[in-house]
Image (cartoon, helix red, strand yellow):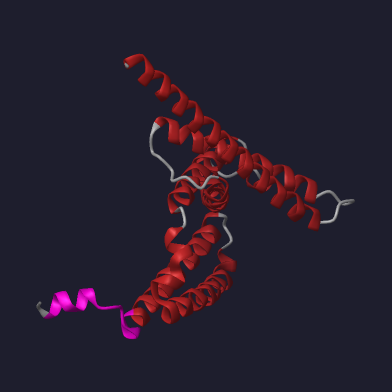
Amino acid sequence: MDDEQRFQERPRGILYRLVQALTGILILACLISGYLGLRAIVWRRSADLPALLSSGLTIAFVVGLVLGGFYLIFGARGMRFVLNFNWMSVQLGLVFGMLLYGIANAITPLLPTYAREDFVARGLQGAVDGALIGAFAGAIVSLIDRKPVLLTRFGITRYTLLFLLVLIILAAIITIGNQPQISRNVAFWLFVPAVLILRLLVSVYDRWRDNRYVRWDDWDENLVE
C-alpha cells in the first residue's frame, strides 16, 4: 500500500478539517456578501453597499463558525444534516423564483417607485429578490416532501405544484401578519401547522400511490399466470 492510498483510507485529520472549514467560510462570505452587494446595485442603493457587505461578512462568519466548529469536532458526522439536505430542491426553487419574480416585476413593478425603470432593469430586480424567496420556498418544499427531486416530467410537475402551494401559503401568511389588528406572532403559528399539514397530505398521497401500483402489479401478474 503506497502513501497516497494510505492517506485516502485513514480518517480526516484536524488540519484537513480546519482547511475545509476555513475554505467553506470564505465561500460562504463571497456568496452572502456578493448577493447583498448585487441586490444593492440592482435596486440603485449603492449608498448601502458598504453596510450590506459588512453584514454579509458578519453573517457568513457566524454561520461558518458554527458549522465549521461542528465539522472540526465531529468530522463528517457533525455535518450530516447539511450533507443529507435536499439541496436540489433549494436550487430548483432559486431558479423558479428568479423566473417568476423576474417576469412579474418586469411586467408589473412590485414597487410603484421603480415603475420608471426600463424592462430589463425591473426584470433583474425581481430576479435578484426572487432568487432568495425561491430558495427559501424550495427549502420548505424539501421539508414537506422527503423524496429526492426527480428531473422527470412527473418529478418536475410534483415539485412545481408543491412550490406554488408554498408560495401561496407564504403570501397568505404575510398578508395576515401585516394586518394591524393581528399580532405578528400569529404568522409563525400559522406557518408551522400549514407545513405539517402539507407534509401529512404528501405522505398520505405517496402511500396511496404506492399501494395503487402494488395492486396493479399484483393484478398484472395474475393475468400472466
* Outermost front residue: 225
Quarter the N terminus occupies: bottom left
* Outermost top residue: 223
Quadrant in which residue 18 is drawn: bottom left
Inspect this view and state whether residue 111 appears. Answer: no
* Outermost left residue: 2
Quadrant in which residue 162 is drawn: top right
Q: Is residue 129 above or below residue 6?
A: above
Majority secondary structure of magenta residues: helix
Which residue lies at the image location 45% right of the left edge and 28% below the top edge?
214
Q: Is residue 101 left or right of residue 7?
A: right
* Outermost right residue: 181
Quadrant in which residue 106 is drawn: top right
Viewer-closest of 142 and 218: 218
Which residue lies at the image location 44% right of the left edge and 31% below the top edge?
154
Q: Is residue 223 left or right of residue 191?
A: left
Bounds of the magenta span?
A: 3-16
Q: Is residue 147 left or right of residue 181?
A: left
